[in-house]
Amino acid sequence: MKSNSALSKLAIHALIILFIIFLLFPLLWVLASSLKSTQEIYSGSPTIFPQQISFDHYLSVINGQLIFRSMWNSVVVGVISTILVILIAVPSAYAMVRYKSIVNNGILGWILVSQIFPVILIMIPLYMVLRNIGLTDSLTGLTLIYVVWSLPFVLWMMHGYVKSIPFELEEAAVLDGATRSQVIFKVLMPLLLPAIGASALFSFISAWNEFFFALVLLKSPELGTLQVELARYTGMEGQARTGPLAAASIIATIPSMLLFIFMRKWLTTGLVSGALKG
Amino acid sequence: MKLFKAKKQILYSKKELGQIQLLFPVIVLVTVFSLLPLLRGIYLGFTDYRLGDPISFNGIENYIQLFNDEYFWNSFKIGMIWTIVVTALQVGLGLVLALLLNNKIRFASIYTVLILLPWATPPIIRGILWRQMYDPNTGVVNILLTDAGIISAPINWLSSFEYVIPAVIVAGVWGEISKAAIFLLAGLQTISNDLYEASKIDGAKLWDQFRHITIPSLKPVLAAIISLTFMWNFNTFGIIWVLTQGGPGGLTRLPMLAAYEEGFRYGYIGYAAAIGNVMVIILSLVLFMYIRVQLRERKES
C-alpha cells in the first residue's frame, strides 16, 4: 500500500490532518476556555480563540486548597505505590526468568486470566478486607490497591525485559570473581534501568489516572485524589466553575501527556509481539 | 543445555531457597490480593450479602432476580450497544489512521505525537472536556452547529433522550482512536515490504493489496486489538460517570455503573457481584473467540 505520486501524498497529509483536528479540538477548546475570563466564557457567543488571555483560572486553581490538596494526594499515592511495585516486581521477574519452575507458569497464566474479570469483582472483596483492617477511606488502603492493581502488568513487562538479558553476562561476571550483589547492581541493574523506568512511569500514571477504586474507597473530602476531586467538582458546576475546571483539567493532563510522548516507543512492543507469538 | 544447568547449580547452590525468597512477595500478594479476592468475589455473586450483615449462600436466586430485572436488561442492552459501536468505530477509524501513517511521509513523528494526546488524557478529564464541549450555554458543539444553520436552538445533548447515546459514543470513540491506531500501526510495520513490491509487479491494485496482503498479515494483531478493546469498552466507567452519571433516566447506565450503584450506593453487594459474574461470562466468550482465531492462525502457518 505504498503510493508515491505527489497528489496521493497530499491527500494522505490532508486526511491525517483532518483526523488530528478532530483529535485535538476538544483539548484546544478547553485550553482556550481555561485562558478566557469568566465573562468571555458566558458571553453568549464565545469564540474559539480567547479574545484576551487571562491566567486567573490557573491562579485560582493553584490557590484553591481543594485541587492542590487532591493533587498532592495523587502524587503521594502514585509515588509510594510505584516504588513498592518496582521493589516487588524486579526481583520477582528475575527469579521467574532464572529459576524455571511450575510456579512461573501459574503466575503468568493467572496474570492473563485475571484480565477478564471486571474491577467490580476485585473491588468488592478487597473493600471487605480493607474494611476489616480499617483501611477504607484511607490513602494507605488505596496505595495497597494500586500496588496490587499494577503489579501483574509490571511483572509481565519486567519478565519480558529480564528474559532478553543473556545469562552468559552474569556467568562471566561470576567467573571474574564478582559477588552476588555485584552481579545484581553492577551487571543487571544498568541493563534493566530503562525497563524499570518505563515500568515505573506506567505504574505512576495508572495510579494518577485511576478513578473507580478511589471513588469507592475514599469518602472524606480531604482525602480525594485528583480524579475524584475533579469528578466531584464537575457535579456542582456553576457559572464560576467552567474556567477553573478547564484549568484544572489541563494541569491534570500534563503528567500523563509527558509520559506518553516520552514512552511512545514502548507503548506497543509488548502487545504486538505478544499477539504475533500468540 | 545440561552443561548450562550444571553451571547454574554451581553458581547459585541454594537455588530453591533463593527462588522462594525472591518469589515470596509475589506469591503472597497475588494470592492474597488477586486470586483469593476474585474467587471470593465470584462466590459473593451467589449470596445475598449486604455490607455488615452475615453472608448467606442463596444459589442462583440473584440470577433469577437479574433475569426479571428490567434495569439490568436495559443496562446490558446499552452496555452491548456502547461496546460494539465504540469498538467498531475505534478499530475502524484507527485502522484508517494507521494505514495513512504507514506511508513514508514527512512529519510522521510529529503526527504520531499529536495523535497520542487524547489517549494520554485521563478518562475523567475526557469526560470533563466533552461535558464542556456539549454544554448547552457555552459549549462549542452548539455554537458550531447553530452557526452552520444545522440546528436552530441549542440542544442539551447530555440530558436529551434522543441525543445522549450518540453524544457519549462520540466522546468515547474520541479518546480511544489513538490507542487502536498506534497498536495497528505497529502491526502494519511488521509486514514485509517485499510482499507489496512483489504484488505490484504482478499488477495488483491498492485494494487488492489491502485485501490479500494487509488484512491477512494483520489478522493476529487485529484479533488482539478487537478483543482487548471490546473488554476495555465493556468495563467503561469513569468517562460516563462524569458525562451523565448513567442518565438521563438510566439511558447510559453501563453495566459497571449498574454494578457500582447496586453495590456501593445501595449496599447490595451480593447482587453487584452477580452482575460482575454475568460480565465475566460475556468477556470469557470474547476471550474464547480470540483464542480460537489465534489457534486457527497457528495451524494454518
Image (cartoon, coloured by chain):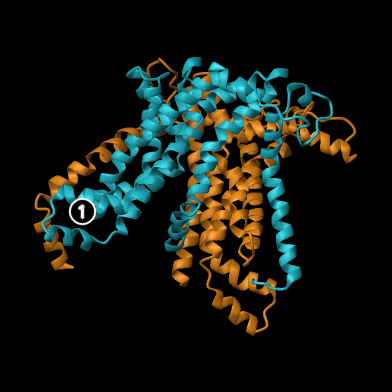
Chain colours: A cyan, B orange
Q: Nearer the viewer, residue B114 or B59?
A: B114
Corner quadrant of residue A253: top right
Taking B285 as reference, is B56 left or right?
left
Identify the residue at horizontal 44%, vertical 67% (top origin).
Answer: B298
For the N terminus of chain B, the image quarter is: bottom left
Taking B116 as reference, is B30 left or right?
left
Identify the residue at horizontal 40%, vertical 48% (top origin).
Answer: A112
Q: Nearer the viewer, residue A35 or B143?
A: A35
Q: Report the label total.
A: 1
Q: Which residue is mark 1?
A: A99
Amino acid type at mark 1: Tyr
Q: Evaluate whether residue B246 shows in this view.
A: no
Q: Nearer the viewer, residue A216 or A63?
A: A63
Identify the residue at horizontal 74%, vertical 27% (top origin).
Answer: B159
Taking B259 as reference, is B166 left or right?
right
Q: Evaluate whether residue A183 shows in this view.
A: yes
Residue B245 point in image, percent of width and height: 63, 26
Q: Is residue B252 above or below residue B207?
A: above
Q: Is label 1 in a helix, a strand or a loop? A: loop
Residue A164 point in image, percent of width and height: 32, 59
Corner quadrant of residue A115: top left
